[in-house]
Amino acid sequence: MECEEVRELTRSTGFRLAIGIQAVTAFLSVIASAVALRKSKQLHFHINCKILMMSMLFLYIVHSIFLAVIQSIQLVLYITSDDPCKILFTVATCFCFRLPTTACLLSFVALQFAITVERMVALWKRCKYEEYGSRLGISLSAASVLISLVATGWAASSEEFKDSVPYCAAATARTADRVTLLCFYMCIITLLTLIAIVALFAFNKIAAKRKIFDLQSSYQIRENATIIPIYTLISPVLILFIIKWSQQLRAAKLKQLMNRCANEKDAYFRTYTQMWNNHIRTL
């Protein structure tokens, strides 16, 4: 990005306002998630479900803290700096802040799917599920976080960490393709989660109206009908965010390709002009 473009971007009121809103929203999210995490300990849900929900709330806090810090730092530098062109962040520095936020975002999707899986197991083993311990919840939480970290590391492995950028984005031109692919898989997983949620909710509503079943089955069925609406609204928000993020990455990639094409044409004509001038001098 040219210096003039950096100066125009960082001095844009809309750009600064967007960063400020993200920082403030992230701070508020930390508070809200912390309160929700504390309250969730009082929920009378199965231990496996509580572990998954509390893991998600904890990752909300981690994601919001890192996002609030990096956006606040950038906003302060953009406002106080006399020359925005001198504000450069190394990709390694951005990676330290963006790795947790991106990994947490992937974990949100994975944990929502894990909650659906846990509820399916609870429905399948409903007669004896209350006797199950916390092994399933811990395993699903650990797997969700581990897979998200590996996926984020894979997306960032093509990055050149010695480069410098004026703004710490979730992806750069080098990683845009891989991040877009991750977004695509996130959309698929979220869609599958939504379908499973609707199916589970409908089945449990029907099953709850039956007259004859044992107490443990009744508990798991009614728990499913109660838990599912709590996190159902999160999925559409994530889908909208992912779609918007993917569009931004595609626009950045197209801009990079256009700039590269322009630079190649300039180099070609400049070389051709030099050859022509040298030929004139020899005559």
Image (spheres, rainbow, N blue to C red):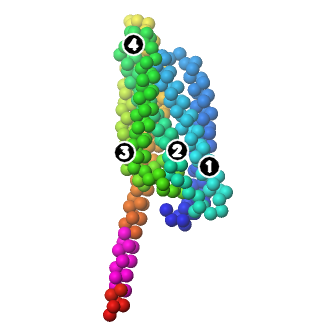
Q: Is 264 on the left-hand or right-hand side of 20?
A: left
| First of labels 4, 1 by sequence position | 1
- The residue mark sitting in front, 4 or 2, is 2
Are discs 4 and 2 less than 8 Å apart at CB? no
Position above or below: 6 against 151? below
Secondary structure state at the residue bearing disc 2? helix
Please provide percent x and percent y for residue 236.
45, 37
Going 60% across and 30% down the picture, which residue do you hit? 34
Q: Mark 3 Cα within 10 Å, few/some/many (few <14, many 20+)? A: few
Badge 1 density bin: few <14, some 14–19, many ≥20, Cα 10 Å: few
Residue underneath mark 4: 126
Question: Is 29 left or right of 181, judged from the image as shown?
Answer: right
Name the residue: 47% across, 21% down. 49
Q: Is 275 above or below relative to 232? A: below
| Residue placed under numbered mark 3 in the picture | 181
Question: Which residue: 53% across, 49% down?
Answer: 93
Q: Which mark is residue 96?
A: 2
Q: What residue did someone put label 1 on?
A: 73
Q: Give the class, few, some or many, for how many residues have Cα within 10 Å of label 2's Cα (few <14, many ≥20).
A: few
